[in-house]
Amino acid sequence: MELVLVRHGEASMQAATDQERDLTERGVAQVQSAALWLADYWQGEHARPAQLFVSPYRRAQQSAAAFIAQMPGLAPVSSPFLTPDTSLAELDAALADMRGERVLLVGHNPLFSNAISWFCGNELREAMAPASMACIELSVVARNSGRLRWLRHAPDYTVIARSQ
């Protein structure tokens, strides 16, 4: 399975609850840029994802909308296992039930930075900034079973890190 993690874009701190935080104008631009980059990447030799799972938090839902706009037909599934407080064991269990060669997840830190270390067995020295993307190859869904293909940050999405 190829797992692509996308952290939501920059979010406002002004909201009644963490779940209600909106993307800033900059955050919207960040995820639009990320969606364009990823859509172009997948039009090459890489097939589009079979599934899109997104955190129920507003900023993640807004971020996912940019990917849906670039990839018509990709239907989002709101997933409670993608919140900032989700444990790695919960994420692991949810992913074990998924089917598809390629899965796109839109969510949060610290979950995603920790997930890279969990699946790839190494400490991620570069945290996932807003609108960052990471691609993990998993032979099976289990701790230390993956390989970090790449970690890319906005705005240019050059490779920041990868497994050796």
Image (spheres, grey):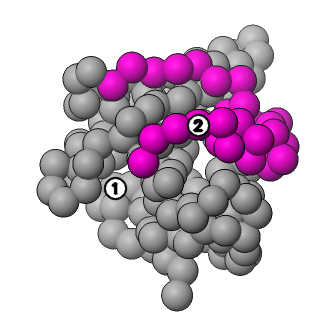
Left or right: 8, with 141 as reference point:
left
- Name the image quarter holding residue 91: top right
Q: Is 163 drawn above or below residue 74 in the view shown?
A: below
Q: Secondary structure at mark 1?
A: loop
Residue at image mark 2: 98
Question: Along the horizontal axis of the image, is 67 left or right of 54?
Answer: left
Q: Position of residue 98 (x, y in %)?
A: 58, 37
Q: Are marks 2 and 1 in contact (CB under 8 Å)?
A: no
Residue 154, visible in the rendered structure: yes
Q: Which residue is mark 1?
A: 155
Q: Is residue 27 above or below residue 121?
A: above
What's drawn in magenta, residue-wise? 74-101
Q: Position of residue 47 (x, y in %)?
A: 26, 48
The local secondary structure at tag 2 comes to loop
Q: Residue at x 15, y 56 (%)?
A: 44
Kindly identify the residue that appears in the image at 68 percent across and 43 percent down.
96
Mark 2 or mark 1, earlier in chain: 2
Q: CA distance from mark 2 to mark 1?
A: 30 Å
Of residue 104 and residue 6, the one placed in the foreground of this image is 104
- Residue at the far left in the pictured view: 44
Other-residue count near label 1 (Cα within 10 Å), few / some / many at <14 / 14–19 / ≥20: some
Image x and y of residue 106, in percent: 53, 36
* Amino acid marked by disc 2: Met
